[in-house]
Amino acid sequence: MNQSTTAIIADDEPLLRFHLEKMLSDLWLDLEIVATCANGKEALEAIELHQPDVVFLDIKMPELDGMTLATQLQKSATPPLITFITAYDEFAIKAFENNAIDYVLKPISETRLAVTCEKIQQRIVQQRLSKQRSSSDPLIEVQNSPHQTILSDLLIQIQQLSAQKTPDYLTWIKAYQGEDLHLISIYDVLYFKAEDKYVSVYAQQENNKVTEYLIRCSLKELQQKINPDHFWHIHRSSIVNVAKIDKVKKDLLGHLHVHIGGVKLSVSRNAQSLFKGM
């Protein structure tokens, strides 16, 4: 595209804003990020000031949530294209995926983000061609864009999903290595293990190396924040990511052990029923 494209990122997670901006700079060289915002109020002010082509908008933000902000933006004469950043799981996403609206699912996948960028670029080209036609022929009636209609339908569906009060499980873990804070995707976690006053997080990196981090909360507090269908409490000191289990073996005494990330974790007697049928 000859014209430059401008965008704003709005999300209350500073590390997510940083990583999204970096990924966008790699995937879309002509995209100019004119502002990054920590809440909906900041985003609204930045949008009014910069009039961006695109807004990457988190659904859940303090002060002004993404849905309310998106609804306000649709009243504008020239609303930006909105790409939602959402922590809804894949099942919820399918409820509105057929509407062909753009979204980025947390934790952000670069492959999925690349697809989203292509969709936005195509839509911007269509918008600019439409404006050229209408300016060259004043008799052409300017109607609401398909994006506006689709977005209105999407907002209704998201509100319906929110009304179902689906548990808001963690998609990112804030953990430490020494004094350094890291943001770890919940899907990269192998297992959690209680150690004294801390909980160790063992995560698998891209090179399959297992790295240990620390979080300052109890295993009981953590268990309330993660999806029990994906993470099983197999022992009073261990919670494992079921999808990452290599194998489950029973020793000569009949005790079960989970093999995961190169280690062997004991399964308590009470938790053995979780593995029936495996």
Image (spheres, rainbow, N blue to C red):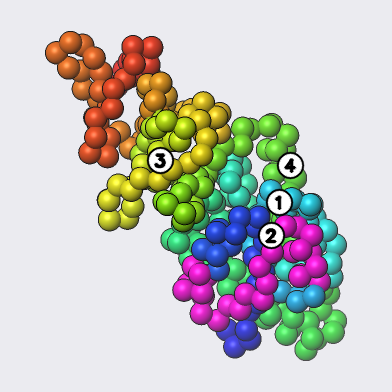
The residue indicated by pointer 1 is: 61
Sequence-wise, the earlier of marks 1 and 2 is 2
Relative height, residue 36 to residue 125 (above, below): above
x and y percent of residue 179 in the render?
47, 54
Sequence-wise, the earlier of marks 4 and 1 is 1
The residue indicated by pointer 2 is: 38
Residue type for callout 1 = Met
Q: Residue at x 51, y 39 (%)?
A: 216
Residue type for callout 3 = Val
x and y percent of residue 51 in the render?
76, 75
The residue indicated by pointer 4 is: 159
Image-based side of 218 in relation to 157, left or right: left
Quadrant of the frame with the C terminus? top left
The residue indicated by pointer 3 is: 201
Local packing at callout 4 (Cα closer than 10 Å; few below 14, some 14-19, many 20+) is few
Q: Nearer the viewer, residue 93 or 86?
A: 86
Image-based side of 222 in relation to 155, left or right: left
- Could you tell me if residue 241 is visible in this image? no
State how far apart marks 4 and 1 are (Cα): 15 Å
x and y percent of residue 60 in the render?
69, 48
